[in-house]
Amino acid sequence: MKMSLLKQFPLEELKLIYQVLHRNLKHEPELWDAMMLEQLQMELMQQASHQGYDTSIHLEWERFLQNEPRRNPPQLRVLEGGLA
């Protein structure tokens, strides 16, 4: 399997490019179908997942793109008689 060409670029550059493209989706509707944007998003989501971000939660995805620390999900505590 071929390595993604995107892996050769610094993560911070990829995040910046993605954010600029994403901000301009409403002005450039052709971007919605751009394979490059789709591949870029998939690469970034993979990186985010490797760093422990849950990309299915929009806030976590934004935190990753903005270089903010991820929030740990609340821990469930098991008490006598059930969960708390």
Image: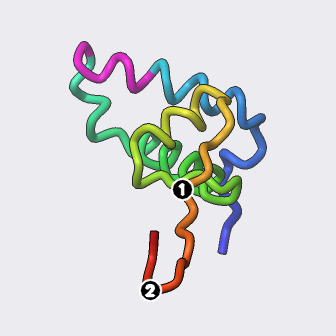
Picture coordinates of residue 71 (x, y %)?
A: 60, 44
Looking at the rendering, which quadrant does residue 8 occupy? top right
Give, as a single range, the part of the protein colored magenta: 21-27
Total numbered circles: 2
Amino acid carrying mark 2 in the image: Gly
Residue kind at label 1, given as amino acid type? Pro
Instruction: State whether residue 33 is above or below residue 16.
Output: below
Does 79 appear above or below 16?
Answer: below
> Alpha-carbon neighbours of circle 1 within 10 Å: few (<14), some, or many (≥20)?
few
Q: Does the magenta segment cover residue 23?
A: yes
Question: Label 1: which residue?
Answer: 74
In the figure, is residue 79 to the left or right of 35? right
Please indicate whether residue 6 sits to the left or right of residue 42 in the image.
Answer: right
Is 46 or 39 nearer to us in this picture? Answer: 46
Q: Secondary structure at mark 1?
A: loop
Q: Nearer the viewer, residue 32 or 45?
A: 45
* Residue at 43%, 23% in the rendered image: 21
- Front one among 73 and 36: 73
Above or below: residue 13 compared with residue 7: above
Q: Residue at x 45, y 76 (%)?
A: 83
Q: Which residue is mark 2?
A: 81
Residue extending farthest to the front is 80
Q: Which callout, 2 or 1, points at the residue further toward the start of the chain?
A: 1
Foreground mark, 2 or 1, reads: 2
Name the side, left or right, on which 7 lies relative to 16.
right
Magenta span has 8? Answer: no
Q: Position of residue 84 (x, y in %)?
A: 46, 68
* Quadrant of residue 56 within the rendered picture: bottom left
